[in-house]
Image (cartoon, coloured by chain):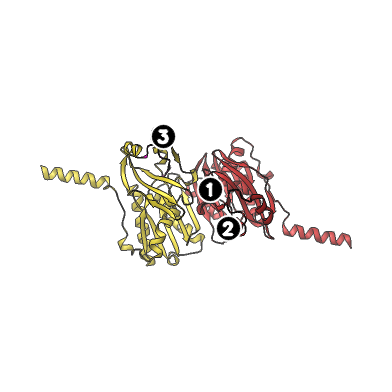
Chain colours: A red, B yellow
């Protein structure tokens, strides 16, 4: 089954094409350009590099959140459009679970982290097994102090674009923390494809119209609007 | 220092751009198209994706062999052309050493292997350390039976596009063999950039005119020509 996967939930962006467990092509960029400019040319490049059209892909996968609201919306909207035009199933997976899949082949416990600002990180923990990551806690936004207490003296691999931040802030109170290998520390579309494979191959993908982002917090604009509305009602 | 690196020594092909230890962009393809068709568009895509021209790159790196004669020549000739036009230093690194760099962050001993046909593999062995791979033997072409005896009961990671072949043939006599994680088993331009970094940053890169392939065996056409010439001389 050919899966086209997109990861655009943070500062890096990547697109890949897999066939079963085989990576046919992957395009990764982490040079600060906006995803709205880079994502579609990257998808076109990956497909044309493999001599395929969107209609020859069997399913689409995207990192659905948590992460940058703008990044996630660009990824989900793009995949929605492709899946609608090609009339193929799609799946949104947890950005954090996709990061853990990126470490397939390693062993130990991993904390997948993204900078959520305001002293918080988006976080989920997994045990790495030969079959894939086994989830140990739900995706959540958590304060760094709370995470430090939870990890404590346990050995723990950090992955994700919040990994360096966490490592710097927590290494003194969590002496057995280590960073994922540098070539694996950023999320990739390959992890997204791995995380979506079981859903798509078992026919549990959704049509384009049902594809949704998976936000852990309401976007800032919506939070501010709710505050304003509450203020108006109060007055 | 910005390095553009190319890996085209076997069936997969990749191009990356690094700045110090940071991966800015990488494009990887493993879908069977010929490198002569894919490589230049991939280089253009990586550079334009980062908003750079070849003149803004500080050095060029390429997997110089061992590997497919055609693949290596396409990579070396392309990098030679780019470095000449941009008047920048370049470096050819061992394809096998680049594979070991691709496993940075892992620990243990690794055998880097490429299918060399006729029951042989191109092989080199490294110890993986936090600073990078430490070489344990020179690049060489070796028979599978000899490699099996050498590895014996030792734990050994296999990486490279000969890894699956070796694993299948040797797993019975070498019970502690294991395959590198699937996302790291194929060589990448990132490994090439890592292997070339020390040479290029210390000013030991060579001008385009001095860039050479690193063959372990003469190409088949040259071997056949030598045989014919010997035959003619004999008659």
Question: Dots 2 and 1: beta carbons under 8 Å?
Answer: no
Identity of the residue drawn at 35% across and 57% down: B92
Image coordinates of residue B140 in percent, x first then y, are 31, 46
Q: Using the numbered discs, state the Cα–Cα distance from disc 2 to disc 1 in whole angstroms.
A: 25 Å
Whether residue A74 can be seen here: no
Q: Which residues are magenta?
A: B151-160
**Side of B5 where A235 appears, left or right:** right
Where is residue A125 shown, x and y percent of the image? 63, 46
Most foreground residue, A193 or B108: B108
Q: Residues within 10 Å of mark 2 (few under 14, many from 20)?
A: some
**Secondary structure under badge 2?**
helix
The mark that comes first in sequence, 2 or 1, is 1
Same subunit under labels 2 and 1? yes
Q: Which residue is mark 3?
A: B171
On-image quarter of the N terminus of chain A: top right
* Quarter assignment of residue A54: top right
Label 3 to label 2: alpha-carbon separation: 38 Å
Residue A66 lies, in percent from the top left, at 66, 51
| Disc number placed over residue A16 in the picture, else none | 1
Residue holding disc 2: A164
Q: In the picture provided, is A210 more to the left or to the right than A226?
A: left
Q: How many marks?
A: 3
To which chain does the residue with label 2 belong? A
Q: Position of residue A62 (x, y in %)?
A: 61, 47
């Amino acid at each position: 089954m050919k899966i086209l996967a997109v990861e655009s939930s943070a500062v890096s962006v990547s697109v890949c094409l897999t066939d079963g467990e085989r990576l046919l092509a992957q395009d990764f960029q982490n040079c600060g350009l906006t995803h709205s400019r880079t994502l579609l040319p990257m998808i076109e490049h990956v497909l044309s590099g493999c001599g395929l059209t969107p209609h020859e892909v069997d399913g689409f996968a995207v990192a659905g959140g948590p992460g940058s609201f703008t990044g996630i919306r660009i990824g989900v909207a793009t995949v929605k459009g492709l899946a609608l035009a090609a009339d193929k199933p799609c799946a949104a997976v947890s950005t954090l679970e996709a990061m853990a899949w990126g470490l397939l082949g390693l062993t130990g416990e991993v904390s997948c982290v993204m900078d959520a600002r305001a002293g918080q990180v988006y976080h989920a923990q997994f045990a790495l097994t030969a079959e894939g990551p086994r989830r140990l806690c739900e995706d959540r936004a958590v304060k760094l102090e709370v995470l430090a207490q939870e990890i404590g003296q346990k050995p723990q691999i950090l992955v994700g674009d919040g990994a360096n931040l966490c490592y710097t802030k927590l290494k003194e109170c969590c002496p057995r923390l280590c960073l994922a290998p540098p070539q694996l520390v950023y999320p990739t579309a390959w992890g997204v494809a791995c995380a979506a494979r079981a859903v798509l191959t078992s026919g549990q993908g959704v049509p384009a119209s049902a594809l949704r982002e998976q936000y852990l917090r309401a976007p800032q604009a919506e939070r501010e609007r709710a505050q304003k509305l509450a203020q108006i009602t109060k007055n």
